[in-house]
Amino acid sequence: MTAAQARLWNGMGDAQPAPEPGRAALPAQSDPPPGRERSAESAPHRAAATRILIVEDEAELVRALRINLRARQYEVLAARTGREALTLTMSESPDAIILDLGLPDIDGTEVIVELRRWYHAPIVVLSGRTSPGDKIGALDVGADDYVTKPFAMAELLARLRAALRRDEAEVGRDRPRQATVGRWLVDLTAHQVSRAAAGEEETLRLTPTEWQILELLLNRPGQLVGSAQLLTAVWGPGFQQRTNYLRFHMARLRRKLEDNPARPRHLLTEPGMGYRYQP
């Protein structure tokens, strides 16, 4: 082991395995999916953990980061290449990314450029490149922070927490409290759907599951929300492959909210990736 690695892993010894979080039941729903999908509506699930994607080709470093992140209750994904990172980000929608610049296939700076076309969560660069030009270049194209190797694990984790706090504050500040879908006005504070036209008092009832899905989409207008992210947030980590649940509930939401459910204008499907609310 090199001196640099020894400094890197300093403090790892106190990392403990993450305890199993408690489970809470989903709210009851009056119209669960047909057949076997009924069990998913009543299945217990735990609150989704903050999901971190590590983009790094050095296996031992990935292992060190994974141990420390999991010990602090983060869910961890890992990608070895830039292309794998782009694919995982699109499908899994991580809450933050820790990114090396020296990747085997694509330079990390190019990965940031591509990600910033549609991904808005924090990106923390973790790189052996120490020149001011490299740091400025990464920050200018969209990185939120830059940590150089060798590094102290405690400092990296503190910078990650700070980036997540800033992102949460910005999302909360920008989060819409009302949105229009077709002829309907959705009030996310009052949890009420009513006709958008003045003078019309008709209201629309949504089930608890429909509200959960709709809020996740409306809170990120114009942005792709991955199927795995939606399934984990609504049903729990064990349901990431149950895309038929989403299809069922999205079809119901479109029938209720869209003027033409067969050709939706607002609740859009991105095939193979997820869904998007288009204002």
Image (tube, rainbow, N blue to C red):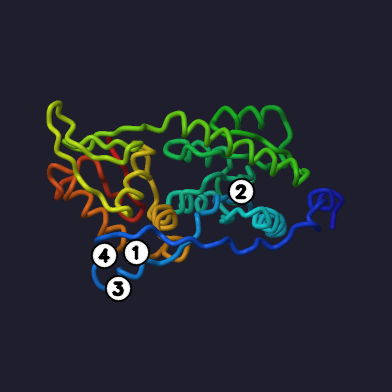
Q: Position of residue 147 (x, y in %)?
A: 70, 38
- The residue pinned by badge 1 equals 41
Q: Nearer the viewer, mark 2 or mark 3?
A: 3
Neighbour tally class for label 2: few under 14, some 14-19, many 20 plus, Cα within 10 Å: some
- The residue pinned by badge 4 equals 33
The first of marks 2 and 1 along the sequence is 1
- Amino acid of disc 4: Pro
- Amino acid of disc 1: Glu
Helix, strand or loop at label 2? It is loop
The disc at residue 36 is 3
The first of marks 4 and 1 along the sequence is 4
Q: Nearer the viewer, mark 2 or mark 1?
A: 1
Q: Position of residue 77 (x, y in %)?
A: 56, 56
Residue located 84% across and 52% down the image = 6
Q: CA distance from mark 2 to mark 3?
A: 44 Å
Q: CA distance from mark 4 to mark 1?
A: 8 Å
Q: CA distance from mark 1 to mark 3?
A: 10 Å
To which quarter of the image does residue 235 belong? bottom left
Residue located 61% across and 29% down the image = 137
Query: What quarter of the picture does the C terminus occupy?
Result: top left
- Amino acid of disc 3: Arg
- The residue pinned by badge 2 equals 103
Labels 1 and 3 touching (C-beta < 8 A): no
Q: Residue furthest bottom?
A: 36
The first of marks 1 and 3 along the sequence is 3
Q: In this orientation, which residue lies closer to the viewer: 8 or 157?
A: 157
Labels 3 and 4 touching (C-beta < 8 A): no
